[in-house]
Image (tube, rainbow, N blue to C red):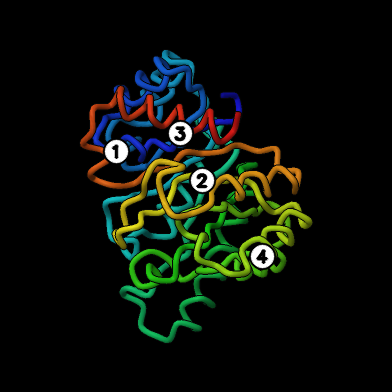
Amino acid sequence: MDRISFNTITNYYLDMESVLKLYHNFGISNATLWREKIDPIGVNHTKRLLENYGISVTGICGWYDRPKSSITLQEKKRSIEIAAELNSPTVTILAPCLDGFEGSLEDCRKVSFEQTALLLDTARECQVKLVIEPVHPKLLNSVSCLNTLDQAIEWCEKLGPGVGIELDVNNLWWDPWLYKQMRVAANKNLICGVQLSDVSNDGSQERVIMGKGVFNIEDFVCFLNELGYSGMFEVELIGKSLWMRDSHQYMKEIIKSCAHLLG
């Protein structure tokens, strides 16, 4: 379980203390936290809870239940600072989306790249790895205009040291050149995180527990191992039907799927 981290959005309906206690009880010692759960209680209280339950922070994310176009550059810079304060090695920053942007998709991507460069300066100062994440193209209006692994690799090459890429199964599984680009990213030492979930077969945006969807996630993990990936595997399950389940039974199923997948 040393290489397993839980993104707390997997248990989105739980408050910070409840979710950290749950992870502690299941032997999980690594977690990625969201600003929308940190902000109400503050960084210092969050630190105390992490210490109480023996949880290390592996990443910081922003806000799930909030329009992405409303998140300011200053708020993103603060996320980087919070990552440093909580001893998180990484912070994930989504490129802005088309929602609210007055201009073409190409213009949006240009502005997003420039913003990422500004944030990278802050990340370097804070000694935190800035993580960019390609997001499924169906979400380019509402979530991010960075949509392919190839595009993310190009951004990293232009931005230079201090930035890496998160591979989110649910956002990348559709790409016919996924494995080819994964090899390129690995050869350039750009893969700094992997988010595990499976893909629903009913066309919904809800994610499913690994091994219960349409993506061949075993081959995906095997390929990462072949590439020499030695970082964390982060469970990130998003969906109201999942969040409404009994937490203990839900966690048992996730842990079982992780044991089967990762050994």
Q: Are marks 3 and 2 in contact (CB under 8 Å)?
A: no
Secondary element at tag 4: helix
Residue tagged by mark 1?
Answer: 12
Please report the residue visible at 31 percent of the width from the left and 62 percent of the height from the top: 203
Choose the circle earlier in sequence order: 3 or 2.
Answer: 3
Q: Amino acid at mark 3?
A: Phe
For marks 4 and 3, give the CA distance: 25 Å
Tag of residue 6: 3
For marks 2 and 1, give the CA distance: 16 Å
- In depth, the one of 105 and 2 nearer the eye is 2
Measuring from the top left, give residue 18's x and y in whole percent. Answer: 29, 23
- In depth, the one of 16 and 42 nearer the eye is 16
Residue tagged by mark 4?
Answer: 153
Choose the circle earlier in sequence order: 2 or 1.
Answer: 1
Please report the residue visible at 68 percent of the width from the left and 51 percent of the height from the top: 162
Measuring from the top left, give residue 152's x and y in whole percent. Answer: 61, 65
